[in-house]
Amino acid sequence: MSKKPATNRAEAAAATATQREAMELSEEVMADLQRRLRRVEGQIRGIQQMLTEGRDCRDVVTQIAAGNKALEQVGFVMVAAGLTWCLEDPERSSAAGYEVADVQKMFLKLA
């Protein structure tokens, strides 16, 4: 039975990602990322509640900016950990599909 080809960019990217080995992140980094994401999730829920309550637009936008900044920080922590991993074991990270240049590109996506 053959696999059906990906029909869009998102499916193609997901298929490629599942074929690669995952970047190794320490338990401490993973816990930090999860904690940060839970905080962002709470901020988003708070923004939804503010909209439901009809809160002032300036207050809502301030909270959106804070949530956006917090989510960016999640990305920066992840990229920093990935860069550290690449530099500590370049052969293994390269074999997993993470050259230093790839991690630099990820950083630039966030910048």
Image (tube, rainbow, N blue to C red):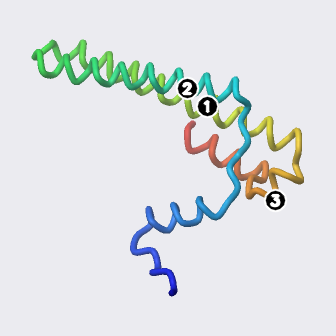
Q: Is residue 37 above or below residue 8?
A: above
Q: Amino acid at mark 2?
A: Gln
Residue 8 horizontal/vertical position (percent): 40, 70
Image quarter (top left, top right, bottom left or bottom right) of the C terminus: top right
Look at mark 2 in the image and give the residue it sits on.
73
Q: Secondary structure at mark 1?
A: helix
* Eye-nearest disc, 1 or 3: 3
Sort mark 2 into few (<14), some (14-19) or many (20+) by Cα contacts within 10 Å.
Answer: some
- Numbered mark located on residue 76 in the image: 1
Look at mark 3 in the image and give the residue it sits on.
95
Left or right for 50, reference 99: left
> Which is more N-terminal, label 3 or label 2?
2
Q: Secondary structure at mark 3?
A: helix
Left or right for 53, reference 29: left
Q: Is residue 21 above or below residue 37?
A: below
Quadrant position of residue 62: top left
Q: Are marks 2 and 3 in contact (CB under 8 Å)?
A: no
Sort mark 1 into few (<14), some (14-19) or many (20+) by Cα contacts within 10 Å.
Answer: some
- How far, Cα to Cα, is label 1 from label 2? 5 Å
Q: Amino acid at mark 1?
A: Phe
Q: Secondary structure at mark 2?
A: helix
Residue 84 horizontal/vertical position (percent): 80, 35
Q: Amino acid at mark 3?
A: Ala
> Which is more N-terminal, label 3 or label 1?
1
